[in-house]
Amino acid sequence: LLVQRQMSVKEREVEDFQEALKIYTDATSSQPNNLHISIQNLPDRSCFIMYEFWQDRLSWMSYLQSPISKTFQRCIIDSLEEPEMVSTMLLPASWWIMNNN
């Protein structure tokens, strides 16, 4: 499962947001069912796009209920200019295996 999360951050909140994002990214990347996590920063707009690759939808949904995920959501809520945009896409396992060996 590929999860894309787009977050537009208020200019004055970027530093605090980046600290929360680093903590979240480090914790998420160490999860056994997280295959990969990547962040792209669009500097001209203070927009961050996060890509999370999960073993399956259930793994991601379970992680959303974890303390680290809930803490991240609480930390960033006041930093965002607008609600976070989240989209998901299922990918065949063969794609992941082929591109990561």
Image (cartoon, rainbow, N blue to C red):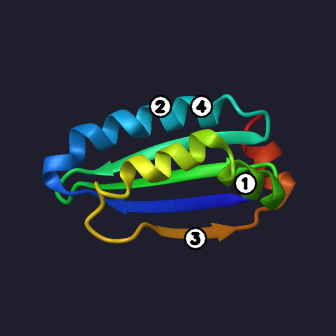
Between 88 and 9, the residue placed more toward the observer is: 9
Find numbered disc 4 in the image and state the secondary structure of the residue it sits on: helix
- State the CA–CA distance, disc 3 to disc 1: 12 Å
Tell me where residue 34 appears, x and y as whole percent. Answer: 72, 41
Tell me where residue 63 appears, x and y as whole percent. Answer: 71, 48
Does residue 39 appear left or right of residue 55 in this picture? left
> Of circles 3 and 1, which is in front?
1
Residue shown at the point (37%, 60%) measured from the top left? 7
Q: Amino acid at mark 3?
A: Ser
Mark 1 Cα shell of 10 Å, populated few (<14), some (14-19), many (≥20): some
The label shown at residue 23 is 2
Find numbered disc 2 in the image and state the secondary structure of the residue it sits on: helix
Mark 2 Cα shell of 10 Å, populated few (<14), some (14-19), many (≥20): few
Residue tagged 1:
60
Does residue 53 appear left or right of residue 39 in this picture? right
Q: Amino acid at mark 1?
A: Trp
Residue tagged 3:
87
> Of circles 4 and 3, which is in front?
4
Q: Quadrant of residue 57?
A: bottom right
Residue shown at the point (72%, 44%) measured from the top left? 99
Does residue 69 appear left or right of residue 5 in this picture? right
Residue shown at the point (31%, 71%) measured from the top left? 82
Q: Amino acid at mark 4?
A: Ala
N-terminal-most mark, 2 or 3: 2
N-terminal-most mark, 3 or 1: 1
Q: Amino acid at mark 2?
A: Ile
Split into 4 quadrants, where in the image is the C terminus?
top right
Q: How many marks?
A: 4
- State the CA–CA distance, disc 2 to disc 3: 22 Å
- State the CA–CA distance, disc 1 to disc 4: 13 Å
The label shown at residue 27 is 4
Split into 4 quadrants, where in the image is the N terminus?
bottom right
